[in-house]
Image: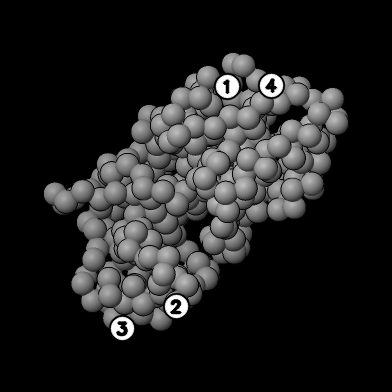
Amino acid sequence: MHYAIFYNPTAGRGNNEDTAKKIATKLKASGHTSEPLTAPNPKKAVEKIRQAVTEYDGLISIGGDGTLNLVATAFLQAKKTIPLGIIPGGTINNFAKRWQIPHDLDAAVNLILEQHLEQVGIGACQDRQKAIVSSLTFGSLADISNQVRQSEKRKFGLLIYPLKGIKQISQKASYKVQVQTEDFNEKIKVWIFLLTTTHLVGGIDYVPSSPHAFHVSILHNMRLGKLFQLLFFVLTGNLRQKKAHTLTYLEPKKIKLAPLEKKQIYSRIDGDKGPALPLTIEFLDGFLPIYAKKTQDDTASK
């Protein structure tokens, strides 16, 4: 097989080029050929990958969920997929963890060489022009992520997030949004909206796996007296009740989000700034062919 090896040479620790060379060497030893694929910015990356689906037999992505998003977005726009090998290189790697992709480079490449494909689900929005590989969020969770600086994370660790959260509550930073799914239609003052394609948040299991639909958690009607529930949600993502006065949990295959106020509400997708509402989001079951471990689990491909 002839592979494209996609990576951002300046991302992470800046050693992705060396990683790509090691992968190419291992592929060659197994009778495969490969070429590196890079781009100066996300827009150019999507364009190059969109073209690559007609030129290569498969693509190997080095990076985290954000890098995988560029690949999946290009596949969506091309209306075509090719087998995808994943080399985890992000901070959390939710998607790779869900599908048991090894973090060890040799083990991850060996998994690709085994050539076993699983057809897994992802999300899509903007008329299937933008992928959602792991998560989409808006509200104070997204705002907090934008506000936190690297220096603050080094100084305070994970504690910085609930500290920022307290500030957001005091400012009553909610967004009025109409949320519509197959069996839910309500106008809600959203404080945190979190949609995931897997049962992982921050690399932690937070709900039973049901991969043929989204997991949607909406924190709303917040006030300081309900801070404990907020802290529990932010630090663990753990959901034990389907519905609560301040927490709504849904498992839709399609969801429409419409703002009910004039100010723009921007999403974050797979860790990066995403489009503003309104949005229609679809779950595309079995869209993405990835090299993964063989499994008897019915939560893999149909």
Give the residue type at disc 4: Asp
Q: Choose the circle earlier in sequence order: 4 or 1.
A: 1
How far apart are the alpha carbons under marks 2 and 4?
46 Å
Seen in the picture, residue 109 relative to 137 is either above or below; the reply is above
Mark 2 and mark 4 residues within 8 Å of each other at the beta carbon: no
Residues packed near mark 2 inside 10 Å, few (<14), some (14 to 19) or many (20 plus): few
Residue ID for mark 2:
156
How far apart are the alpha carbons under marks 3 and 2?
24 Å
How far apart are the alpha carbons under marks 4 and 1?
9 Å
Q: Choose the circle earlier in sequence order: 1 or 2.
A: 1
Mark 3 and mark 2 residues within 8 Å of each other at the beta carbon: no
Instruction: Select label 1 or label 3 by which is in front.
Output: 1
Give the residue type at disc 3: Gly
Residue ID for mark 1:
52
| Of residues 87 and 118, the one drawn nearer to the viewer in this rendering | 87
Identify the secondary structure beneath mark 4: loop
Instruction: Select label 2 or label 4 by which is in front.
Output: 2
Question: Residue 5 lies in what quarter of the image?
Answer: top right
Q: x, y (%) of residue 70?
A: 49, 36
- Name the residue located 36 percent from the left edge and 77 percent from the top edge: 163
- Name the residue located 58 percent from the left edge and 53 percent from the top edge: 13
Q: Is residue 160 visible?
A: yes
How far apart are the alpha carbons under marks 1 and 2?
42 Å
